Image (cartoon, rainbow, N blue to C red):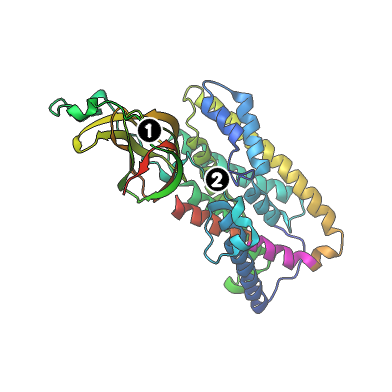
Amino acid sequence: MITGSVYAHGVDEDTQTFLSGNSGVAFVPFLYIGAKHMLTGYDHLLFLVGVIFFLYRPKEVLLYVSFFTIGHSITLLLGVLADMAINAYLIDAIIALSIVYKGFDNLGGFQRFLGYQPNTKAAVLIFGLFHGFGLASKLQELSFDRTGLLTNLIGFNIGVEIGQFIALALVLFIITNWRRSSSFMKFSTLTNTLLMAAGFLLFGYQLVGYFNS
Amino acid sequence: MAEIAHQILDKKSIVKQVVIALVIGAVLLVSAVLPAEYGIDPLGIGKATGFSKLYVGDASAETATSGPHKVLQLDNVGSGADVPKPAAANNPAPATPLAERTDEVSIVIPAGKGLEYKVNMLKYGSFKYEWITDKGELYFDFHGEVKGNSNYFENYTIAYSNNMVGSFIAPFEGPQGWYFKNNSNEDITVKIKLKGQYLLKQ
């Protein structure tokens, strides 16, 4: 654990104390933790910015959320219930790469170099699966009681969706308004380059964490 | 998915943007994030900028612990029934104690190794002590031997800790101090402070 106030993908210390000391059913607290996790996870927010960047139809946005939700719900439930242990650093490194992926995609990288656009829905679904493993490994680190596990897990999962919804609304609001300004197109290359830079940075951060642990 | 109409860059520009992103990411990683988050500072930039100061090693955490400890038992204490207590242990205390002094010393206990730090004391001489590791726990054995007979020893405290303080009165004349064992896979530095009546061992 690194002491500090920022936790990528993590759960902060107070929450951790609660989770470790928790026994039995605690639906609402887990709901809260799930939502908070989603709203304070900057890797997830960056990925959202990348995906939403050029999407404008509400239907498309909704579709994206659904695929992402299906992906991470499957692996979150599977990971915790089947007690699958996957290294959190490696999962977070892959999530960091998803940010690079989306930035590269937005610049037109795949169209130029592959000659076609990889299926965005599939990509979002796959990254959703990885993200779910990340959530699962974070919950597993906190050895909470297995009593009420399923209820708590569902609470956490619903919380994640609520948090995602709020995050999405915020990101969408900002980007939609920004799109009306001429600076959007002017800075779109810069924004996506910075997204990639952030992705590379987080990737390195997680990899070093992995080899350091 | 339908996206709003936007221009995509040509190959050369995309490569350029990826390189720029890599450079920004790498520079921030090496100069700020690694020094601040892990205390890793290969180029010394973190030290120069002060990012290294943000790094707080977690004393109690996983870095230098080595899984569950061996359970310590009463049988681990002392030199054993077959070693008689030397008569010298019952010598009277000297009329004049050693002069008061203060010392501070740092010792590196290499990963997987054990080291001892002792001072010479007279009977009923006393000191206050403090020691702390830079990271993680050490197995330690605070013990003393009767002067001229290292077969017989007393174990005052055997435990696992990263930090210990107390005061101590020597029950007999002879070397007194700590054996530290580092069971982790990283070197651990232990800083010891002493204040009292003793002489540093030569």
The boundaries of the magenta stretch are A187-197
Query: Residue B53 location, x and y as percent?
Result: 61, 53
Query: What amino acid is at disc 1?
Result: Pro
Residue B173 vertical placement versus B64 (above, below): above
Q: Which mark is residue B97?
A: 1
> Is A132 inside the magenta-drawn segment?
no
Direction from residue A84 to residue A199 in the image, left or right: right
Task: Count residues near mark 2 (Cα–Cα under 10 Å), then give few for <14, some for 14-19, many for 20+.
Answer: some
Q: Is residue B162 above or below residue B5?
A: above
Chain letter for the residue marked with disc 2 in the picture: A
**Image coords of residue B12 (percent x, y):** 65, 79
- Which of A206/B191 is in front? B191
State the residue at coordinates (47%, 40%). Answer: B61
Which residue position is annotated with label 2?
Answer: A2
Cα separation between marks 2 and 1: 48 Å
Query: Which quadrant of the rendered structure holds the N terminus of chain B?
Result: bottom right
Residue closest to the eye, A100 or B100 = B100
Residue at point 75% right, 65% down?
A188
User: What residue is rendered at 56% in x and 47% in y?
Assistant: B56
- Label 1 element class: loop
User: What amino acid is found at the position of numbered circle 2 in the picture?
Assistant: Ile
- Residue B91 versus residue A122 in the image, above or below: above
**Residue B142 picture location, percent across and down:** 33, 34
Q: Is residue B85 left or right of residue B44?
A: left
- In the rendered image, the vertical position of residue A170 relative to residue A116, given as above or below: above
Closer to the eye: label 2 or 1: 1
Examine the rendering and report whether any part of residue A108 can be seen: yes
Q: Identify which residue, B37 or A144, lies in the foreground.
A: B37
